[in-house]
Amino acid sequence: MWEKLLFFDRRIIFVFIAIAVWVPFLTQLELPPGQTNPRTQALYDAIENLPPRTPVMVAFDYGPSGMPEVHPMAKALTRHILSRNLRLLGVALALTGPPMCQDAFSSVSQDLDKQEGVDWVNLGYKPQPVAVITQIGEDIRRAFPEDAQERAIDELPVMAGIHNYDDIGLVIDLATGNTPGAWIVYAHGPYKVKVAAGVTGVMATDYYPFLQTGQMIGMLNGLKGAAEYEELINHRDLGTLGMGSQSVAHLLIILFVTLGNVGYFAFTRRR
């Protein structure tokens, strides 16, 4: 029996993992995210404390490959910001960012009856992140004279009175790369604008030093961070559903690892 367990066909394991991922998602299994990370709570509180109609800039620095972890964050943040009657500015330092921005903003704004150009705007993509971040600090019109729809931003009510970081209450970078570091160095450093981030789980440890020094005010950590934020705004969505699949799959992996080790030691002892 132990020998059979030790040389278990891995294809059967793949089938079990597929079932563990799909069944919770299809049945919409919702597991509580547990205790909220203080960094998640800090970002939530920062948005809660902004006065109405304060501009919040969200940078969409990810693409389709990062959607499972980061896009639920984008939708949860969008819902919170718009429901607080804040102005929402979307920018992208990644070429694949504008479609992510448009999907998050448009889908959530329909539920909240918010208007493009009045409550939110997708300013589109610009290359050379350092140059773009610096230009926004001088005058946002140097970096984004038009939005993604090629409309002059001076014609959009949402952009009224916004010139540089002095007029923006918070910058949030949603990223799968190293762009949060650029926002910290070139936006928070010289212009003292508040910066937060939402990153994949494997990236989070790189940014804890910036959280500890106060250079970032908060951070969403992977899919769990998205689920925690959905719990805070009382609107469970893809983050919560994804955590159900992820949690069940992790438990199954732990079970297989445990059985594999038990089988190995029992088999070698018998030999």
Image (cartoon, rainbow, N blue to C red):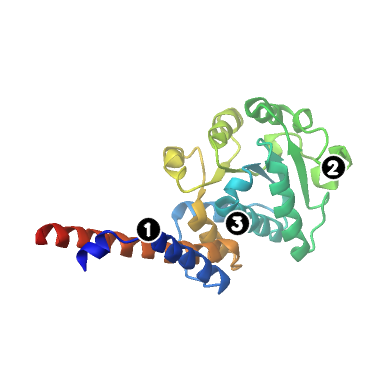
- Mark 1 Cα-neighbour bin, 10 Å: few <14, some 14–19, many ≥20: few
- Determine the secondary structure under disc 1: helix
Task: Please identify, in this view, whether the residue under mark 1 or under mark 2 is nearer the observer.
Answer: 1
- Determine the secondary structure under disc 3: helix
Asked if residue 8 is positioned above or below residue 88 in the image, the reply reads below
The residue under label 3 is which amino acid type?
A: Pro
Q: CA distance from mark 1 to mark 3?
A: 32 Å
Asked if residue 33 is positioned above or below residue 187 in the image, the reply reads below
Residue on which disc 1 sits? 10
Residue on which disc 3 sits? 72
The residue under label 1 is which amino acid type?
A: Arg
The quarter in which the C terminus is drawn is bottom left
Asked whether residue 54 appears in the rendered view, the answer is no
Relative to residue 137, is residue 236 drawn left or right? left
Q: CA distance from mark 1 to mark 2?
A: 50 Å
Image coords of residue 113 (percent x, y): 79, 63
Residue at image coords 72%, 34%: 164
Q: Could you say which disc has been placed on residue 149 in the image?
A: 2
Image coords of residue 109 (percent x, y): 76, 59
Residue at image coords 48%, 68%: 19
Identity of the residue furthest to the bottom in this view = 27
- Determine the secondary structure under disc 2: loop
